[in-house]
Image (cartoon, rainbow, N blue to C red):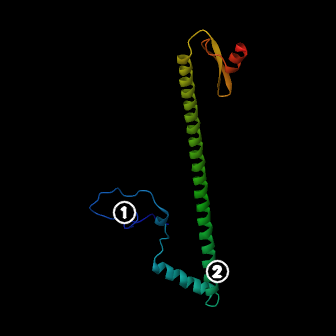
Amino acid sequence: MAACPDSCHRCTPTSQTTQAPRNTSLTPHCFMFDIGFSEMVVIGMVALIVIGPEKLPKVARTVGILLGRAQRYVNDVKSDINRQIQVEELKQLQEQMTQQARALENSIKQDVHSVEADLNKSIAPPGDTFIVAVDHQSTVVDQPAAMEPPAAAEKTST
């Protein structure tokens, strides 16, 4: 096998005026059998002599089928590896997004709690207390005595 030749149109810049850097990584098309036509003729002649003219077409067909199967197998393995890489990248992305969403949720909750606490402090003067429900938890906050629940006010007036 030989490395990609300098005349490869995929690895060299298409425009000579543009000084684009040459692609130094060898892509799969860059690996090819370095067999010319004359070598193929010699291999064919040797196969004709060794195998014989009667069995040569059958052997050539079998070799072609086996090479096709091998190529399909290699392509299947490559595609499986690429799928696994993509799945792993998607899992990492999902994990990052989940962490960012949790961080945002916690930040918003803290901001809401601080704003709510500030509002409760600014509304109620110190002295009396009342209970405020916040996120399913009860907290005690100062309240003036003038603010009674309506049910308690009715009981005292009757």
Name the secondary structure under disc 1: loop
Where on the picture, by quarter, is residue 6? bottom left
Where, quadrant-wise, is the C terminus in this rendering?
top right
Image point (56%, 46%), residue name: 93
Image point (56%, 12%), residue name: 125
Where on the picture, by quarter, is residue 95? top right
Compared across the picture, whether 147 is left or right of 26 comes to: right
Point out the tag, 2 or 1, that comes first from the N-terminus: 1
Residue 86 picture location, percent across and down: 57, 54
Look at mark 2 in the image and give the residue it sits on: 62
Compared across the picture, whether 139 is left or right of 93 comes to: right
Image height check: is 100 above or below 33? Answer: above
Where on the picture, by quarter, is residue 123? top right
Image height check: is 17 above or below 58? Answer: above
Look at mark 1 in the image and give the residue it sits on: 12
* Camera-nearest residue between 105 and 76: 105
Identified by mark 1, the residue type is: Thr
* Camera-nearest residue between 100 and 147: 147
Spatial CA distance of label 2 from label 1 is 37 Å
Q: How dense is the environment of label 2, judged by Cα within 10 Å: few (below 14), some, or many (20 and up)?
A: few
* Camera-nearest residue between 100 and 114: 114
Q: How dense is the environment of label 1, judged by Cα within 10 Å: few (below 14), some, or many (20 and up)?
A: some
Name the secondary structure under disc 2: helix
Identified by mark 2, the residue type is: Thr
Image point (58%, 31%), residue name: 106
